[in-house]
């Protein structure tokens, strides 16, 4: 399950990705990264999960373990849902599956891997393939830009910055937060 997936992840930012998904799934509500500037109140529904198109790519790599099928890319810097929403249950199931694949193939070595294993690639695929599509609202970039602006700090990226800033914070807060969310702390 997702707890085993979380415990198997050796990278703090991937654990943070899991925690944000678990938080919205368990408690419901709206998640925003710290580098998102709120322009207006986004919708929070008692029925729908709300996800946002980050961008529409001209093409996506389609080969290898990180191969993708969809040029309309979803964000994982902002999303919302009521508690126990089936869309986020499917997202968490896919994260657990990808964590197993990553562990078996030793894939936790690059930023691209993190994007695929626990990041926006998971939300993208589930949003396009989900069985709960009748209860998911996908907001296009124009709608998103009226609600909030993502500053794309990217401070988690190791390949661009050299180290993960705030790693000590991930290592301290993320395990505590997951235990609290799951009622074990």
Image: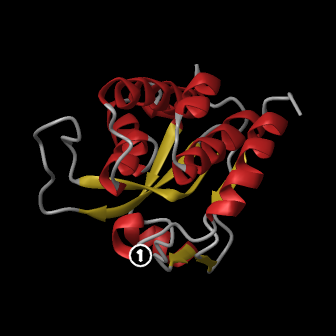
Can you see residue 43? no
Decide if residue 3 is on the left or right side of residue 148: right
| Residue 51 screen position, x and y as percent | 49, 51
Which one is in front, 59 or 160? 160
Which residue is disc 1 drawn over? 161
Please name the residue shown 58% across and 75% down the image: 35
Decide if residue 119 is on the left or right side of residue 169: left
Please name the residue shown 43% across and 33% down the image: 133
| Residue 1 screen position, x and y as percent | 58, 19
Decide if residue 67 is on the left or right side of residue 169: left
| Residue 75 screen position, x and y as percent | 44, 57
> 124 above or below 37?
above
**Regarding mark 1 in the picture, which secondary structure is present there?**
helix
Which of the image's four quarters has the C terminus? top right
> 96 above or below 113?
above
> 135 above or below 131?
below
Please name the residue shown 41% across and 50% down the image: 120
Number of numbered labels in the structure image: 1
Decide if residue 94 is on the left or right side of residue 8: left
**Which quarter of the picture shows residue 165?**
bottom right
Residue count near mark 1 (Cα–Cα under 10 Å), binned few <14, some 14–19, many ≥20:
few
């Amino acid at each position: 399950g997702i707890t085993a997936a979380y415990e198997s992840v050796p990278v703090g930012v991937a654990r943070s990705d899991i925690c944000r998904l678990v938080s919205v799934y368990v408690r419901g509500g709206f998640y925003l990264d710290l580098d998102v500037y709120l322009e207006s109140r986004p919708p929070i529904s008692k029925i729908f999960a709300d996800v946002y198109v980050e961008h529409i790519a001209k093409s996506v790599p389609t080969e290898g373990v990180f191969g993708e099928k969809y040029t309309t890319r979803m964000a994982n810097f902002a999303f919302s849902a009521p508690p126990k929403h089936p869309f986020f249950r499917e997202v968490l199931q896919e994260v657990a599956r990808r964590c197993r694949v990553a562990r078996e193939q030793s894939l936790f070595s690059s930023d691209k891997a993190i994007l695929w294993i626990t990041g926006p690639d998971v939300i993208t695929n589930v949003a396009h393939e989900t069985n709960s599509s009748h209860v998911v609202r996908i907001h296009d970039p124009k709608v998103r830009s009226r609600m909030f602006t993502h500053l794309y700090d990217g401070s988690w990226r190791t390949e661009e910055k050299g180290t993960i800033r705030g790693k000590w914070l991930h290592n301290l807060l993320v395990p505590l937060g997951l235990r609290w969310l799951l009622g074990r702390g």
